[in-house]
Image (spheres, helix red, strand yellow):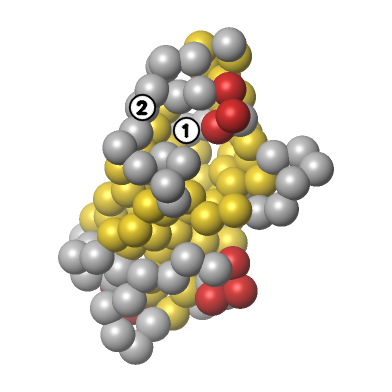
């Protein structure tokens, strides 16, 4: 399994931008579909964005489509989430996740992922 370390969260005003990064250990990063999830207080963990192991397939939650961009660099074992036009409702702990795959698929459900980062707080003030 890979180990995931996230960085880049913080506090921003509505309309601002943040970039989350997730660095993975191990030599099999390109075998994993990667995703970002978030969890706000009192709410269930929800899917934000996912990317296939090749980077050729991407899927976004409707709530972030057009504002967020997921990308990966298999040579550097990293995945990023660029978040633009942030809204107060984006406030949550954001998690990076990895799920091993046999095909170039995108996973959207938490139980499809078997490795999780520590979580990074993103707070958007109105």
Q: Nearer the viewer, residue 99 or 75?
A: 99
Q: Pick the residue in front: 122 or 31.
A: 122
x, y percent for residue 118? 63, 51
Q: Secondary structure at mark 1?
A: loop
Residue 46: % across, % down: 59, 53
Answer yes or no: do the residues labelled 2 and 1 have beta carbons within 8 Å? no
Q: Secondary structure at mark 2?
A: loop
Which residue is painted at 39% across and 32% down in the image? 83
Q: In the current view of this chain or complex, which residue is farthest to the bottom?
A: 102
Characterize the local packing of mark 1: few (<14), some (14-19) or many (20 or more) Cα atoms within 10 angstroms.
Answer: some
Q: Is residue 78 above or below residue 87?
A: below
Q: Residue at x 32, y 48 (%)?
A: 70
Residue 19: image location, x then y, percent: 39, 33
Query: Which residue is painted at 42% across and 47% down in the image?
Result: 62
Examine the rendered structure and indicate whether residue 76 appears above or below residue 43. Answer: below
Residue 68 pos. (x, y %): 35, 38
Residue at x 27%, y 78% (from the top left corner): 104
Q: CA distance from mark 2 to mark 1?
A: 13 Å
Can residue 25 be seen here? The reply is no
- Using the image as rendered, state which of residue 70 and residue 29 is in the foreground: 70
Q: Quadrant of residue 92?
A: top right
Q: Nearer the viewer, mark 2 or mark 1?
A: 2
- Name the residue beneath numbered marker 1: 8
Instruction: Give the labeled residue for mark 2.
Output: 84
* Residue 40 falls in image quadrant: top right
| Observer able to see residue 107 | yes
Q: Is residue 33 left or right of residue 93?
A: left
Location of the C terminus by quadrant is top right
Q: Residue 35 occupies which quadrant of the picture?
A: bottom left
């Amino acid at each position: 399994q890979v180990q995931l370390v996230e960085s880049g969260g913080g506090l921003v005003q509505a309309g601002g931008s943040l970039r989350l990064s997730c660095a993975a250990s191990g030599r099999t990063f390109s075998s994993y579909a990667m995703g970002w999830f978030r969890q706000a207080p009192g709410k269930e963990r929800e899917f934000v964005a996912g990317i296939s192991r090749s980077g050729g397939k991407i899927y976004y939650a409707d709530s972030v489509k057009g504002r967020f961009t997921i990308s990966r660099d298999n040579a550097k074992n990293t995945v990023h989430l660029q978040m633009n036009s942030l809204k107060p409702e984006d406030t949550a702990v954001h998690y990076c996740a990895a799920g091993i795959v046999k095909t170039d698929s995108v996973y959207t459900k938490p139980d499809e992922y078997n490795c999780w980062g520590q979580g990074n707080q993103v707070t958007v003030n109105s």
